Image (cartoon, grey):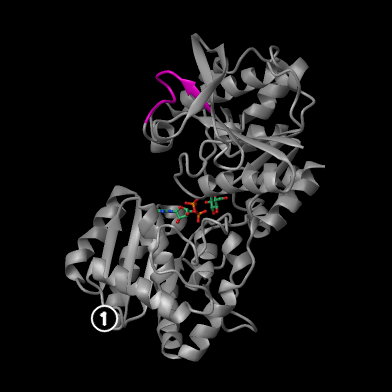
Amino acid sequence: MEIIHITAECYPVAKAGGLGDVVGALPKYQCKAGHLAKVIMPMYRTKFLYNNNFTVDAKGTASMGNLTFEYTIIKEATNKLGFDLYLVDINGLLDREKIYGYNDDSERFTAFQIAVVDWLSKWQHNPNIVHCHDHHTALIPFMMQNCFAYRDKLKTIPTILTIHNAQYQGWMGWDKANYIPAWDSWKQGLLDWKDTINPLASGIKCAWKVTTVSDSYMHELRSNSNGLEKLFEYERGKCYGILNGIDNEVWNPKTDTYITNHFTYKSLVKGKQKNKEQICEQFGLNNELPMFVFIGRLVGEKAADVLPAAIAAIMHSFYGQCSVLILGSGDPAIEWELASFNARYQGYYYADIGYNEALSHLMYAGADFLLMPSRVEPCGLNQMYAMRYGTVPMVRSTGGLQDTVKDMGEVDGFGIRFNHPTVEDIHYSVSRAIEVYQDKTHLNWMRKYMMQIDHSWEGTVAAYDSIYG
Ligand code: ADP
Ligand code: GLC
C-alpha cells in the first residue's frame, strides 16, 4: 500500500514534541511491514536540511487568496530514514528556523497544505491512503474533496486524520475563507465550527476515518476536547483509538547513541547508577538520593504550572532526601519560576530551561522516577521511554498515561498513578516513591519488569492496517 503522511514535524528532520517522534517512526515501520510509506512536510531551516542531500522532485505554482506562490518539493536522496522524505519549500513562508510560533502560522500551514494537494493532483497515479496529522494538515481532506481544481482527481482517495492533540485546532476567521482554493460554497458547513473556520473540526468531518493516539483519550474527547465534544460524539462511528509505539532502535539503553553507559535489564542496577552519576556530576546533585525528573513542554496541558508549588512542597518535606531535575521550555513565567529555584535548592534541584535531545536521553537512563502530572495526555511517549530505561513513571491517570502505566499497588504494577494534577497528589506520590526507593528488591523487580514491556511499533502498524481497510 502506498501511504502519504502529511505532517508539520518528523524526527530527526524537525521535532517539537511527540508528533515528531511518531511521524519519524510509524512510516519506517510501515515500510518494514511491506508498505510504501512516505512523508511530506514543510522545509524548515533545520540542521537536517543542511547536513543531507536532496534532489528536486517537483515544482509548481499555486494560490492562497491574492497571493500566488511557487513551491518546490525536494526529496532526501538516500532514503536514510527508512522511508521517502519530501520537503515543501515555499519561499518566505516555510523556510524559517522554528516549526511554530509565528504570527502568520495560519498562512504558512494553509499554503503548505495547498502545495501538497496541488502536488498530489499532478501525480500520474493516486496513493492508496492520505494520512494527515493534527490541525496543520487537517484541511487537506476538505480540499481534496471540495476544491474545484482538485476534487476530480483526488476525492476518491481514502483520507485518515490522526489527532495527536485536540487542544490546538488551527482556528481561522471567516475573513480567510478565500485562502482555500475555490471551493463549492454549499460545503461551507464542512469548514465551520462555532462561527470560525476550524481546520481540526473540518478534518474530523471530512476524513474517511479519524484516529487518536490512545483509547482512553478517544473516550475523553467526547467530554473534553476544547469545544469539539459534540462533534466527536456525532462522528464516533468513524473514530478509533490506536496507541502509539516507540522506536526501539532510537530508544534502546543498550545502543542509545546519546548515552555512553549502556545497559540492559540484566545490567540495569549498575548501568542506571553510572548514568545517574554522570547527570549528578553535571548538575551538582547527590547521586545516592532518589532522583525525580520532569521532561517536557512547560505548558498547562502538562500541568507545568503546578510544578513550582509542588517542588517547594517536596523540598519542604523531603529536603536532603531526594533530588529533582527539570528539563523543559515553554511558558516564560513557569520557566522563570523553575529556574529561580536553582539557587535556593542548590545541590538538590536543577532546572535546565531549553530543549536538549541528548540530555533527555541521559535523564531517562539515569533517573529513578519520571513525573508526568499532565492535565491532558493523548498518548505520552515520555512514560514509555522511561519504562524502556527502567525509570519508574509517576503519572496522573489520564489518556495514554492511564493506558500504559499500572500502579505498583496492583498485581504486576510498576509505576505510580495519581488522580489529580495537584500539589497534594504529587507530594503524596513522591512520598510513595521515596519509600519504594528504600526497598531495592521491589524497585529492581519493577525496573526489570517494565524494561521488558513491548511498546514496539509492529502492533501499532497492524492496527493502522486494519483501519486503512
Ligand atoms: P508532547 O508531544 O505532548 O510534548 P510526548 O510525551 O508525546 O509529549 O512527547 C514529548 C517528546 O518530546 C519526547 O520525545 C520528549 O523526550 C521530548 N521533549 C519534550 N521536551 C523536551 C526538552 N525540553 N528537551 C528534549 N526533549 C524534550
Ligand atoms: C501529542 C500529545 C502526546 C502524544 C504525541 C504523539 O503531542 O500531546 O500525548 O504522545 O502527540 O502522538
Nearer to the camera, 136 or 374: 136
Check the image and name the residue furthest to the front: 78
Label 1's element?
A: loop
Compared with residue 432, is residue 281 higher up or lower down, i.e. above or below? above
Across and down, in percent, residue 56 comes to 53, 20
Check the image and name the residue furthest to the right: 469
Whether residue 453 is visible here, answered yes or no, is: yes
Whether residue 165 is visible here, answered yes or no, is: no
Q: Which segment is the magenta one? A: 87-96
Nearer to the camera, 282 or 160: 282
Q: Name the residue under label 1.
A: 319
The N terminus: image quadrant: top right
Compared with residue 256, is residue 82 higher up or lower down, i.e. above or below? above
Q: Tell me which corner region of the image, top left, top right, bottom left or bottom right, holds residue 431.
A: bottom left
Q: Which residue appears at 35% of the width and 52% of the height?
A: 356
Q: Is residue 69 magenta?
A: no
